[in-house]
Amino acid sequence: MSSSSFSSLPLRPELLTRLDSLGFSSMTPIQEQSLPSVLGGTDVIAQGQTGSGKTAAFALGLLNKVHADTSAVQALVLCPTRELAEQVTQAIRQLAVNIPNIKIITLCGGSPVKRQAEALSNGMHIVVGTPGRIQDHLDREFLSLGALNMLVLDEADRMLDMGFQKELDAIMSQAPSDRQTLLFSATYPAAIEAIASKVMRNAKHIAIEPEAAELSIEVACFEVNADRQRLEAMRLLLLNEYSACSSQEDGDHSPQAIVFCNTRDQVKKVVAYLRQYQFSVAALQGDMDQKERDQALVRFANGSLLILVATDIAARGLDVKSLDLVINYDLPKDPDTYTHRIGRTGRAGESGKAYSLYSRDEIFRLEAIYDAIPSQRLPAKSLLSQPPIQANKVTLRVGGGRKHKLRPGDFVGALTKGEGITGDQLGKIQVMDQWAYVAVESSIAKVAASKISSGKIKGKSFRCHLLIDE
């Protein structure tokens, strides 16, 4: 039996069966190095890039330990953003399918505290949330950590970057001292080391070196001399990616990119410029309300949006399995931020590209990132005459979700019933508490929206409309 196989671990049978049904047989490096210690009850510090498989590592650990017959919070996962917390919750639920009666809740802003408190009063086993909302529930005594046996700090470095040190200290002070603590982080700055030394006991430190993940990433830098040239250079790089993709055998693939900016104003400027040239693009920055953020993230994750222009903090929690290109429109302020950015492409063995734009007076920043600056010439300007590729999917937003007892299969049934739509024309279906998002091929988008709006699902009518670029 291979040591990299999940079946070599002392996991409960329900988890092994579920992993097998999901097609997960071999562990990623971070899982292989951390899971034996996690399952053995040891505190673990795991340093690895986005997409390394860290979520499954701690999710399997806490699900292996949780007891459904004890109606108390036994595991707490802290995340820097609502989006990441929701994704972690979904990942845990996906793995817990075969374990009966496990109750999981997400505690973040954007949902009423009272409603969350009511759910907590019915008994929860696993809580996933952001530090601010978790502390709020603790202060109001809606949440108790008296029975907690596992605490997970996910993307701990980002939580500190976002100013959650005070909340983290308050939460950890209310957790039992004999708990198991797991800390996952892409980088390991001094502030994280200080937390680890204070709240962890004989922790095993595991580091999956970034260099190993970057082998599948094509890295290049492009010099620009003015702000106008920077915008044009970005457009050229995007069009060049589209051109390269259209020449490959997989003609159905629409390449996706994230363009990183350092400020909200730059995000708005770049989005306005790309929309002027009909790119499939949306912003992700701090001035947006939660509904706008949710819709941008959902559309990007299901492939109905091709470009996100984002600030670093706003992009936390973004989960895209295969990202073609990252462009640093603005150079990051430090090497750790650069590591976070480019770690979003070239994931899980897939290839990817990470390009940076710079001016001569930014050479010092490049030297802090690269041993040898991989400078290249921009693609030919003749590309500017080409139109950008458009997404081959559109997202339907339906006014019903988990609170209405709806599941992905209900939407598949409603859309494929009768004539006009087949199952292979449907994409990712994401069901939230009050809403559902359904990706469909662009060619049948209006028919799909009409079927949902004019029909019924489980005997009820639901509003539906298309989410399209502004």
Image: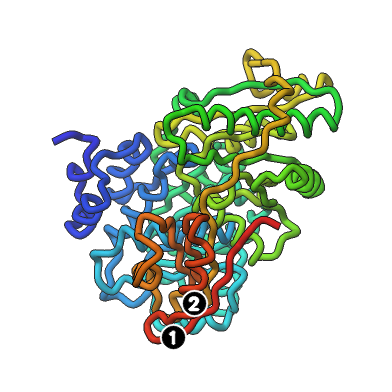
Q: Nearer the viewer, residue 190 or 454?
A: 454
Are the residues at dot 1 and dot 2 in contact (C-beta closer than 8 Å)?
yes
**Vertically, is 283 above or below 213?**
below
Residue 165 visible in the current orientation: yes
Q: Secondary structure at mark 1?
A: loop
212 relative position to 468: left or right? left
Query: Of tags 1 and 2, which is closer to the observer?
Result: 1
State the residue at coordinates (52%, 76%). 434
**Vertically, is 182 above or below 293?**
above
Instruction: Work out whether mark 1 precedes mark 2 in sequence or the reverse, and give the earlier one.
Output: 2
What amino acid type should be assigned to the residue bearing mark 1? Answer: Lys
Residue 400, numbered circle? 2
What amino acid type should be assigned to the residue bearing mark 2? Answer: Gly
Pick out the residue farthest to the left.
1
Count of numbered circles in the view: 2
Q: Position of residue 367 (x, y in %)?
A: 70, 19
Q: Quadrant of residue 188?
A: top right
Residue 161 visible in the current orientation: no
Q: Which residue is mark 1?
A: 460
State the residue at coordinates (51%, 43%). 185
Pick out the residue farthest to the front.
419
Q: Position of residue 453 (x, y in %)?
A: 51, 77
Q: Quadrant of residue 420?
A: bottom left
